[in-house]
Amino acid sequence: MANLNSRSANKLSIVSTLIDSLLAFRRGRPKSGLLLLGAAALSSRVPGIGTAVSLALRIARRLR
C-alpha cells in the first residue's frame, strides 16, 4: 500500500489545479483558466495555493 507524503500530496494538488485550469478554458472562462494556471505554477513554491485559488473561484462564482 502506498503512503501519501507531503511531496506526493503537493504533486496531486498541482495536477488537480491544472485539470481545473483546462476545464475552465473549455467552459469559456479564460480569466479563471489563466488564474488557475498561474496558481499551479506557483504551487511548487507555495504549497496549497492552487487549492486555495480553486476554492476562491468556486465561492466567487456561487456568490454572483
Image (spheres, grey):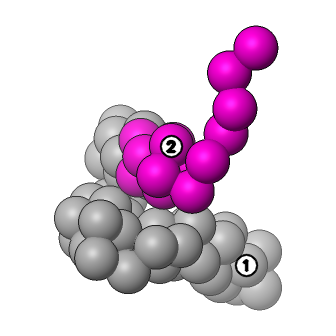
Q: Which amino acid does label 2 sit on?
A: Ser
- The segment highlighted magenta reads 1-15
**Residue, x 58% and y 77% (percent of image)?**
52
Image: 38 above or below 27 = below
Rendered location of residue 41, percent (x, y): 22, 64
* Nearer to us in this view, 50 or 61: 50
Can residue 42 be seen from the camera position used here?
yes
Image: 55 above or below 18 = below
- Element class at badge 2: helix
**Residue, x 51% and y 43% (percent of image)?**
8
Which image quadrant for residue 58? bottom right
Q: Using residue 37 as the reference point, say whether residue 24 is left or right of it.
A: right
Kindly identify which numbered label has been placed on residue 59: 1
State which quarter of the image contains the N terminus.
Answer: top right
Q: Using residue 19 as the reference point, say whether residue 25 is left or right of it.
A: left
Kindly identify which numbered label has been placed on residue 39: none
* Nearer to us in this view, 38 or 45: 45
Rendered location of residue 27, percent (x, y): 43, 43
Earlier sequence position, callout 1 versus callout 2 = 2
Which image quadrant for residue 6? bottom right
* Nearer to us in this view, 32 or 18: 18
Asked whether 4 falls inside the magenta stretch, the response is yes
Q: Which amino acid does label 1 sit on?
A: Ile
